[in-house]
Image (tube, grey):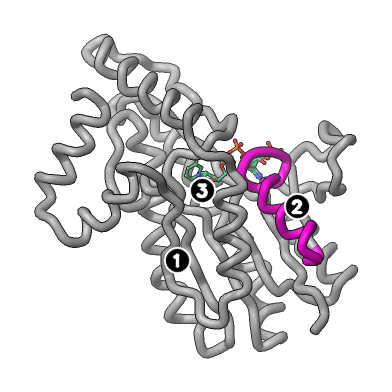
Amino acid sequence: MASKVVLITGASRGIGLACNRWLAGRGYIVFGTSRYPDQHPDSLFPLLELDVTNEESVHACVEHVIRIQGRIDVLVNNAGISLSGAIEDASPEDIRQILETNLIGVHRMVQAVLPHMRKQGSGLIINMSSLAGLVGVPYLGIYATSKHALEGYTESLRYEVRDFGVKVVLIEPGDIHTSITGALPANRNAAYDGVREQAESIHHTNVKNGPPPEKVARVLGKIIESRNPRLRYTVTRGTETLLPIARRLLPHWIVERFIREAYKL
Ligand SMILES: NC(=O)c1ccc[n+]([C@@H]2O[C@H](COP(=O)([O-])OP(=O)(O)OC[C@H]3O[C@@H](n4cnc5c(N)ncnc54)[C@H](OP(=O)(O)O)[C@@H]3O)[C@@H](O)[C@H]2O)c1
C-alpha cells in the first residue's frame, strides 16, 4: 500500500516537530507547517507556510498538499497556543486570540480537508487536546476553556463524518517538555498576587520536567496504524495518569482536592 500522506500543523518545534520526525522516519509522506518557515531553514523537513487563523493561508496550504500528492490521509491539528494568568484578568481579545488558534483554527483546517477526505472515502483527523481539556486548571483557565471546547467539537464531529469513512480522534497529553509558554494578559490583578505566580511556576516546572514530545509521537503513530482508533488517547505519566480515570469514576471533590494540592492552593 502507498505511504499515507500526513499534514501536521505547527511542526516547527515541540510536539509537532517530534511527530513530523517520527512519522517521516517511518516512511510516511509528511507535510509539517509553520507560520514562519523561513526561520527554520535548517529544518530536516521543508515546512509549508500556514497560519491557522487565516482562511487564505489554510486553503493555500491544503491545496498545495493536494496538488502534490492528490490526497490527505491524516490531518493532525497540533498548532496551539497557551495563556497564563487569572481568568478575571483575561480580556475578551485575549480569549478571542486563544480560540482563534486552538478552536477556530482547527475548524478552518477541518473544513478545508473534509471535502478531500469525503471524496477519498477515508481519512483520519487527530486533534491535539490536553488534560486541560478534561479538567479545569487554575491560572490556565482560558487555555483549559479552549481545549474543553475542542473536546466537544471533536466528539460531535466524530458522529457526523463516520459514514464518510473519516475517523476523528483526540490526543490528551499531560505536561510535555516543550517550549510552550503561556502569554500573559496585560492586566495582572494584585488580588491574585503570590498564589497566581506560585501556580504558574508549578506549571512551568511540570512542563520543564515533563517527558519528551516523542512520547506523544509514538502514540500518534499507534493511532495512525490502528484500524479502529478510539475517541481519546491520553499521554500521561505518574499521578497525572489517575486524573482522567478519577474524573470519570470519582466524585468531583476528589479531583478538586488533587488539583488544589498539585498547585498548592
Ligand atoms: N507541551 C505541553 O505540555 C502540552 C500538553 C498538552 C497539550 N499540548 C498541545 O500540544 C500542541 C503543541 O504544543 P507544544 O507544546 O509543542 O507547543 P510549542 O512548542 O509552542 O509549538 C506550537 C506550534 O504551534 C504553531 N503555531 C502557533 N500558532 C499558530 C498559528 N496561528 N498557525 C499555525 N501554527 C501555529 C507553532 O509554529 P510557528 O510558531 O512556527 O508558526 C509551533 O510549531 C498544542 O496544541 C498544545 O496545546 C501541549
Kindly identify the residue that appears in the image at 38 percent across and 55 percent down.
Answer: 149
Q: Amino acid at mark 3?
A: Asn
Name the quadrant of the C terminus: top left
Task: In this rendered view, identify the residue nearer to me: 6 or 28.
Answer: 28
Height in image: 114 above or below 91?
A: below
Quick check: marks 3 and 1 in contact, CB under 8 Å?
no
Q: Is residue 97 visible?
A: no
Which structural element holds mark 1? helix
Which structural element holds mark 3? helix
Residue of label 3: 102
Q: Quadrant of residue 144?
A: top left
Q: Is residue 27 part of the magenta span, yes or no? A: yes
Residue of label 2: 32
Label 2 Cα crowd, 10 Å radius (few <14 / some 14-19 / many 20+) = many
Label 3 Cα crowd, 10 Å radius (few <14 / some 14-19 / many 20+) = many
Label 1 Cα crowd, 10 Å radius (few <14 / some 14-19 / many 20+) = many
2 or 3: tag closer to the N-terminus: 2
Which structural element holds mark 2? strand
- Residue 237 appears left or right of 97: left
Kindly identify the residue that appears in the image at 21 percent across and 54 percent down.
Answer: 246
Q: Amino acid at mark 1?
A: Thr
Task: In this rendered view, identify the residue nearer to me: 157 or 122.
Answer: 122
Q: Position of residue 236 (x, y in %)?
A: 41, 48
Where are the magenta residues, as a range? 10-29
